[in-house]
Image (cartoon, helix red, strand yellow):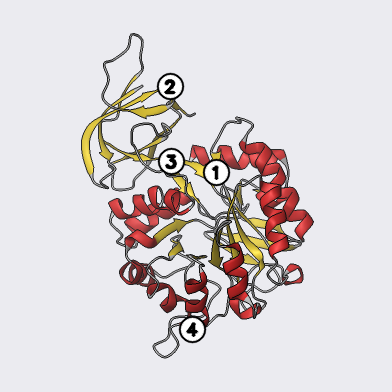
């Protein structure tokens, strides 16, 4: 396939008008046109890499934690159709055996060659989180940090587990846990009431990731900067950010980019099974959530739950409503998450040898989706 006349997002993170060549499902350097080769005219479009969502739970009425093949299929199809061509879904706080089942099935699905987005990892939000900052997680399944449980999760996922969260405030020996496991996977601070000092100790011990910055943690205060301040002061730490227009105020989004620098921000959707679905009530790990418009809340408490937006929606929101430059937002939803979970050799940018996953967005002031190309083939 040859894609012509698009403004292409390059590895230097700028847009320039040039051609894109895809051979045998991978991007390649300039090549002569082969007989019968498809040529796609992308005049009036931006061409960006397929996005990678490293923290979301589901869509189209399905959740990864349903642990069903149908759930994996429908979610992967929905994500790819919206330009998210690689996924690293997040699990909820559930009993260890249930989480193992989710991971085992995911490992099988990732090897199956099924249509849709490529499953390239897992992000475990629980179960080592804080009761005080549980958010929409089910607190009856919260457990202390356990290296034995981590090893079980890694075995079940066949190495696909990329990130696991913990709350230092809930686990007095958190530094030893981090040191023991930091060589196995990425340790993140998630759903935690940790103060600045605790969080800094966790980062110095080897944690290097923050789950949905600002949400399910202390707010930034000038005398108590908390996890937000600790992340800003820790150069090797990446931070997820939900840009759905609901979870984080636009000014706080812009502040995060200034505090951490765009290189450390990872856009995520944190979408639930409510993404792509009509308003109504939906099951949620032994609880219930209510979707109304662009908000999703726990039925019982009214607390904000996950999002109803996919990552492409969040990218648009960041650019069109929050003032984040398109070049920065694309990096934060493609190459930076790919680097964060160590799959940048295959995903995240339009470069020779990488998977031929491409999204065409119209230059219409709305970033409307024109086409999704997965492994060199147009979807839909």
Q: If you read the primary sequence from the N terminus, does the residue marked by circle 2 or circle 4 appear first?
A: 2
* Secondary structure category for the residue under label 2: loop
When the figure is inspected, residue 194 is found, relative to residue 35, above or below; the finding is: below
Q: CA distance from mark 2 to mark 4?
A: 51 Å
**Residue at horizontal 75%, vertical 67%?**
141
Image-quadrant location for residue 183: bottom right
Q: If you read the primary sequence from the N terminus, does the residue marked by circle 3 or circle 2 appear first?
A: 2
* Secondary structure category for the residue under label 3: loop
User: Which residue is label 4 attached to?
Assistant: 197
Residue 120 is situated, as x and y percent measured from the top left of the image, at 55, 43
- In the image, 349 versus 328, the foreground residue is 349
The 10 Å Cα crowd at callout 4, few under 14, some 14 to 19, many 20 or more, is some
User: Which residue is label 2 attached to?
Assistant: 24
**Residue at horizontal 40%, vertical 47%?**
334
Q: If you read the primary sequence from the N terminus, does the residue marked by circle 3 or circle 4 appear first?
A: 4
**Residue at horizontal 23%, vertical 43%?**
15
- Quadrant of the drawing holding the N terminus: top left
Image-quadrant location for residue 68: top right
- In the image, 176 versus 336, the foreground residue is 176
Residue 252 is situated, as x and y percent measured from the top left of the image, at 38, 72
Q: If you read the primary sequence from the N terminus, does the residue marked by circle 2 or circle 1 appear first?
A: 2
* Secondary structure category for the residue under label 1: loop
Res 305 seen here: no
User: Which residue is label 1 attached to?
Assistant: 120
Are the residues at dot 1 and dot 3 in contact (C-beta closer than 8 Å)? yes
Circle on res. 16: none
Q: CA distance from mark 3 to mark 2?
A: 15 Å
Circle on res. 347: 3
Q: CA distance from mark 3 to mark 4?
A: 36 Å
- Report the mark closest to the observer, 4 or 1: 4
């Amino acid at each position: 396939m040859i894609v012509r006349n698009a403004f292409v997002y390059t590895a230097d993170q700028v847009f320039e008008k040039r051609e894109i060549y895809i051979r045998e499902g991978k991007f390649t350097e300039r090549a002569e046109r082969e007989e019968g080769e498809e040529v796609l005219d992308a005049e009036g479009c931006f061409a960006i890499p397929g996005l990678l969502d490293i923290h979301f739970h589901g869509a189209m009425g399905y959740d990864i934690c349903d642990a069903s093949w149908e759930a994996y299929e429908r979610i992967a199809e929905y994500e790819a159709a919206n330009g998210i061509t690689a996924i690293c879904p997040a699990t909820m706080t559930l009993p260890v055996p249930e989480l193992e089942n989710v991971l085992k099935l995911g490992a099988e699905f990732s090897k199956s060659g099924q249509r849709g987005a490529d499953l390239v990892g897992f992000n475990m939000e629980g179960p080592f989180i804080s009761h005080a900052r549980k958010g929409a997680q089910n607190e009856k399944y919260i457990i202390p940090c356990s290296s034995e449980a981590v090893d079980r999760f890694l075995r079940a996922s066949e190495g696909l587990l990329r990130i696991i969260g913990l709350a230092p405030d809930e686990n007095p020996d958190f530094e030893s846990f981090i040191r023991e496991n930091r060589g196995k996977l990425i340790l993140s601070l998630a759903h935690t009431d940790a103060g600045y000092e605790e969080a800094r100790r966790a980062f110095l011990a080897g944690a290097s990731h923050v789950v949905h910055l600002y949400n399910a943690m202390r707010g930034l205060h000038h005398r108590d900067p908390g996890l937000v301040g600790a992340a800003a002061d820790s150069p090797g730490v990446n931070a997820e950010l939900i840009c759905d227009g609901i979870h984080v105020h636009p000014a706080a989004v812009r502040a995060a980019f200034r505090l951490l620098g765009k290189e450390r921000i990872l856009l995520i959707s944190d979408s639930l099974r409510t993404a792509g679905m009509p308003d109504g009530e939906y099951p949620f790990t032994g609880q219930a959530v209510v979707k109304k418009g662009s908000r999703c809340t726990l039925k019982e408490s009214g607390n904000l739950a996950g999002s109803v937006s996919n990552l492409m929606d969040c990218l648009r929101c960041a650019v069109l409503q929050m003032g984040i430059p398109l070049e920065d937002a694309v990096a934060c939803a493609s190459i930076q998450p790919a680097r964060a979970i160590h799959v940048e050799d295959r995903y995240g940018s339009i470069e020779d040898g990488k998977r031929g996953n491409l999204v065409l967005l119209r230059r219409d002031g709305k970033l409307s989706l024109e086409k999704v190309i997965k492994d060199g083939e147009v979807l839909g």
